[in-house]
Amino acid sequence: MLTRRHMIAATTAGAATTLFAPAIIARPAGQAFYATPDDPYPIEPIGHGVIPNKYMRQIVPYANNLNPGAIVVDNRNRFLYVKIDPGRAMRFGVAVGKAGFDWSGHATIQRKVMWPKWTPPREMIKRTPKLRKYAKGMPGGPENPLGARALYLYKDGKDTLYRIHGTNSPTSIGKAASSGCIRMLNEDIVDVYNAAVIGTDVYVL
């Protein structure tokens, strides 16, 4: 299991190699979150009161050895941090894996997909037979559980099968509700997706 001590030690050996785009903090209060021109579906922000305020994006003090751009997921507290500069990070609320499905460790983003197709694993289909109709994949779209974007996590060149992705269930944010992946609000994953690059380090605690 990756601990905070291990995370800091790892960063001294080689952390994220790119800066995180300032667009991550360029969202004035009340401004709509619009999809990019090539998005096939609109992306509407959630209203006030849908999730607790502490899970809404906010800049917080965050001092560690990580380079700007690195992503840290705090499973216990349901937060995802994107390092902005030496002393700050943008913090987002997330949903994490249920007991028995959570994952921790270090990975890198090696694939980025807009409105990704979702293919439930065999084990999930076995647990929930009604998902069998999606054995060959559910097309991307508003009803897809991966939401508007997905960042694919790889370790040692292999797909971990874990993702950071959007959600069509915003009320799950702040809960242990997924099958191991990290869910974000669609308006949040869009900004993280736009700013993250291939090779970005992700630390899941």
Image (tube, rainbow, N blue to C red):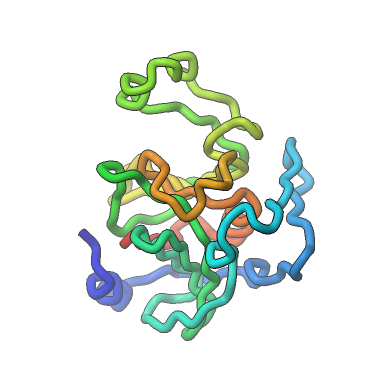
Q: Does residue 60 appear in this view?
A: yes
Q: Can you say whether 117 is above or below 97 in the image?
A: above
Is residue 89 rendered to the left or right of residue 148? left
Picture residue at 24% right of the left edge, 75% below the top: 5
Q: Nearer the viewer, residue 56 or 119?
A: 56
**Image position, residue 89 (x, y; %):** 51, 75
Image point (23%, 71%), residue name? 6
Q: Is residue 184 above or below residue 65?
A: above
Q: Nearer the viewer, residue 33 or 154?
A: 33
Residue 177 image-quadrant placement: top left
Say which quadrant the C terminus sits in.
bottom left
* Vertical comparison of 192 with 161: above or below: below
Q: Is residue 139 above or below residue 14?
A: above
Residue 87 rendering spot, x and y as whole percentages: 48, 85
Task: Give the position of the N terminus as an image quadrant.
Answer: bottom left
Residue lying farthest to the left in this orientation: 1
Q: Position of residue 187 (x, y in %)?
A: 65, 53
Q: How many marks?
A: 0
Q: Nearer the viewer, residue 118 or 69?
A: 118
The answer, for residue 135, to whether it is visible in the render is no
What residue is shown at x 48% (from left), y 14% (from top)? 133
Where is residue 29 drawn, in percent x and y? Answer: 75, 69
